[in-house]
Image (tube, rainbow, N blue to C red):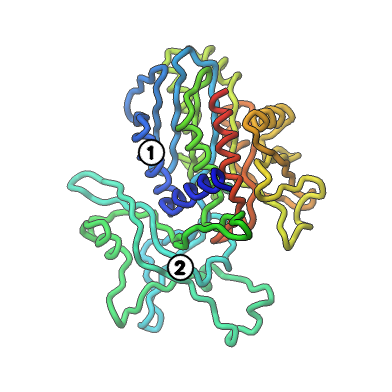
Amino acid sequence: MDEYRRCSEELLKFIEKCPTGFHAVAVLKEELEAEGFQELRETEQWKPECGKGYFVTRNDSSLIAFRIPSQEPKGFHIVASHCDSPAFKIKEEPEMTVENTYVKLNTERYGGMILYSWLDRALSVAGRVVVRDGDELETRLVNLEETLVIPSVAIHLNRDGNKGMEFNPQVDMLPLYGNRGMEDCCLTERVAEALGVMEEDILGHDLFLYVKEKGRFYGENDVFLFSPRLDDLQCVYASSKAFMNSVPEKYINVCGVFDNEEVGSGTKQGADSTFLEDVLWRVGEGLEWGREEYLRMIADSFLISADNAHGVHPNHPEKADPTNRPYLNNGIVIKFHGSQRYATDAVSAARMKMICEKAQVPWQTYANRSDIQGGSTLGNISTAHVSVSSVDIGMPQLAMHSAMETAGAKDTKYAEDAFAVFYKE
Ligand code: CO
């Protein structure tokens, strides 16, 4: 393992620092700044220069970084991934008392999670709040120390509990937070305390329950990774590392990390927004390209949409396609879909295979069984806005959208190596 293990160890540390997409963007910002990348703001004029690196964020939850080669560029080399994960969003006025004794929090689903996997786990609350500072509003990140749990019903009280339970998110999935008899429980008060601000100055929040459990290795020789949020922080981590370590020669390297993929990408900062398009266009404007030159660059660009893929399940191998069967630790998965929910076509697949060969990284292929609908991702959504040749790939994993997911410990490095070749080409 060694090098492979080191890479996955770093990934687990990264995931621990990123309970929400807001935190992922903050961590990446800090790393990019340390690497000498300069922050650009959407509200200001941009003057990008050849040979330099920049980044821009939108809504504090999506980030696009780019690095321009020192010679005249030929187009863009883009890797796109997503930093959000299925979770429970905390509603406004969340405290609910039960029989004047317990306090639980009112939540709703964010994305398509496996509900039962969130029961009886150590959870906590993290996200962003907006705080009044005089006449200004300031955004602050928060990650509470407290543990919360959604307790399941004892088997003695629910004898059918092992026979395909249906879970009602408004009834079965609310986390236990406090005991009103012992102290006054108020989440906003606790958040204010954690941030050192007055409770009445907190005017808005995007707070989520997240799985507090730390990631770890498991299996013989520690071949597997067990962690929350592997979808899609594994791709965020691998692409951002490769991006920061690569100096481009002919193409402008772009690393895009988008929020809201788990809820359809249709927000101002999601992949179905103008964010990527706006950034690429403004880079061109800054480099004094005309419209014609910009379109020439776009025509010579390539996008890798990186989002984890389903590996063959050890207990349910029948769920996988009969002939496209990706396994954990066997390399990058190239995803295909007849109705083009994945952006891969013959040309982009061939190009991805060549990148993998150059990086000495194994590749595998994925397609849904023809009688299963499957999921979707960022690739075809992004290319509807910026129409470039694109391939959908990911690392193989199990239990996607469970509170704790499983991936291969070798695959993080495979992805990083392949992205590095792409960014150097
Ligand atoms: Co995903």
Q: Relative to 340, say whether 95 is above or below.
A: below
Q: Contact, CB < 8 Å: mark 2 with mark 1? A: no
Can residue 341 be seen in the rendering of this structure? no
- Tell me the element at label 2: loop
Query: Among all residues in the image, which is located at the extreme left?
Result: 134
Q: Please report the residue visible at 44 percent of the width from the left and 40 percent of the height from the top.
A: 62
Quadrant (top left/top right/bottom left/bottom right) for the C terminus:
top right
Q: Nearer the viewer, residue 33 or 108?
A: 33
Q: On residue 203, which mark appears?
A: none
Residue 94 percent across, percent down from the top left: 38, 66
> Looking at the picture, how far across and down is residue 33, in whole percent?
34, 34
Q: Say which mark, if any, is on residue 122.
A: 2
Is the CB–ligand 1 distance for label 1 below 8 Å?
Answer: no
Residue 322 location, x and y as percent? 82, 49
Image height of 69 relative to 142, above or below = above
* Figure quadrant of residue 223: bottom right
For numbered disc 1, what is the local secondary structure?
Answer: helix
Q: Amino acid at mark 1?
A: Glu
- In depth, the one of 82 and 404 nearer the eye is 404
Q: Residue 34 in the image: x percent, y percent?
A: 34, 35
The residue identified by callout 1 is 31
